[in-house]
Image: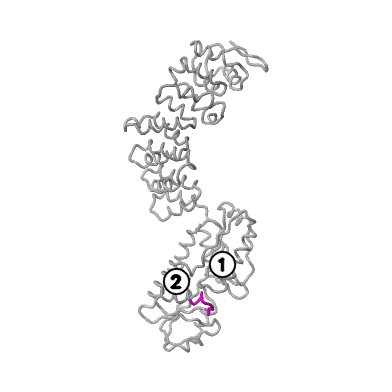
Amino acid sequence: MPRSCQAGETVIPVRLGLSESTDRWQQLQALRRGRTPVQPWLEQLNGGSMLPAADVLAALIAQLDRSAVEQLLSGPVGRDPFALREAARQELPSLSTETRVQQAWLEPLLALPSSLVWLEIQGHFRDARVADRLRGYLEGLSSAEREQPEALRLLPLLGRQRRPQDAELLIRLALEPAPSAWRRAAMEGLAVGLSAWPLVPLCQCLQQLAGDLEPGLAAQAVDLLDRLPDGQRQLRLLQKRELEPAVAARVRRRLQHAPLVLLVHGRQGGVIPEALQLLAAELEQRRAAPVLLQALTAAPPEADGRFWLSARRAGALTLMPLLLLPGEHVRRDVPAIAAHWQRLAERTVGVRRLPFLGAWPDWQKLLATVLAERAGGRPLLWLHHPLQGALSDRFLTHLGHVLGYPGAGASYSDPQASLAVLPQSPALLAPLTLAPNRLSESLNMGGSAPSAEVLPPLLDLSAVRDFLLANLEALP
């Protein structure tokens, strides 16, 4: 029995015994580390005095040059390559990208006749000829042949080739009716080469598979969507669909909401009405990310470590003005506030500034529906604080068309003065404000016409609150 390898010694192998032999393990380690010549091993393998065991071949793979590989493949290993396939599964995923290994193995392997075993070994190397062979073989498989475990291994290897033109085949095989194992293998091929595939067909495929009846496929599709450059947007698209409950829960776990800064008008002294505070608290719970309220009448709030950690994870923070009209606050204050947050972020986090709430078409439609329901056919007048400028005039005209009711500017301190000049008193007054402010409070102090009903601030209406929660929760 050979002695253990000592530093500087050459070990000449003999036919090795049981795999648990200490001497066997030590000799294979010496071979793997290049501390023993490979030629005696090759001679014993080709001469039949040593069995071509997978662990021996695994130790040899990185040590052979092209001439030695050709010698190995010309003997029993080339005639019965199953042990070499097992060795390749262990070693080539990490070694095949090394130039010396590719130069030693690729050409001798390509010179061999095509077979399923050889295709799998070749498939570990990225090469156009290998990719063509893999694709040709996979396209020619019958339904029965697809059920072979060995054939399944070729799909991830095709993905490993990372050729954009192979995306169509892998996508088709993942989507078409077939045994689950076959479709999962096609998905693994997509996963291996994920960044190489054209994004549009890939996203369409994964979106479709997220609703698949096979739970494993659906879950994997969600995971792959999350890895795409616009993965968070893709996951939010899934939120609009009916998914199997476990898949829907997986989508929610993968979503990483950016912290949200809600810009509100605030009251004198920077006081933020309770209705807005409650909205922000519930929104933070739903988004699982910090939500800050910033009043235009106060200094910016302090963002703590949790806020910035969440911003770094999501890659951004979102600035959302909960303002209803394009006044001075929207035109001047909001850009200045966005610049302030960008300075705090120090270029490590993006600041995403969204259009003010009043400009959202869906918000305007909701407002029209809510006011029509509350009016019930009665004359209604919506009130807003006075605005100046051509832009404001155009916006107010547009909003009046959408709402279907006239609007009027009203001083916060004395709205009755504006109402007194109207030719006819409306039956219903709707102050355009989310939370209680001086306008809504002045209207409810009894100075308005006795026949006029005053609607509460918009956040007191359940439809408005539900709309804001749903839409702000869905923000990136």
| Vertical placement of residue 44 versus 388, above or below | above
Judge from the rendering whether residue 270 lies leftward or rightward of residue 132; answer left or right. Answer: right
Q: Position of residue 413 (x, y in %)?
A: 56, 83
| Residue 131 drawn in magenta | no
* Vertical relation: 434 (above or below) 83: below
Q: Position of residue 36 (x, y in %)?
A: 61, 17
- Does 231 sit above or below residue 328? above
Q: Which residue is mark 1?
A: 263
Q: Nearer the viewer, mark 2 or mark 1?
A: 1
Label 2 or label 1, whichever comes before in sequence order = 1
Label 2 sits on a secondary structure element that is: loop
Q: Which mark is residue 461?
A: 2
* Residue drawn at (60%, 72%) of the image: 271
Name the residue at 61% across, 55% down: 308
Cα separation, mark 2 vs mark 1, equals 20 Å
Image quarter hosting the N terminus? top right
Q: Nearer the viewer, residue 323 or 95?
A: 95
Q: Is residue 388 magenta?
A: yes
What crowding class fits label 2: few (fewer than 14 Cα within 10 Å), some (14-19), or many (20 or more)? few
Farthest-out residue, right = 8
Please state which amino acid type lies under the numbered disc 1. Answer: Leu
- Please name the residue shown 39% across and 82% down the image: 379
**Mark 1 residue element:** strand
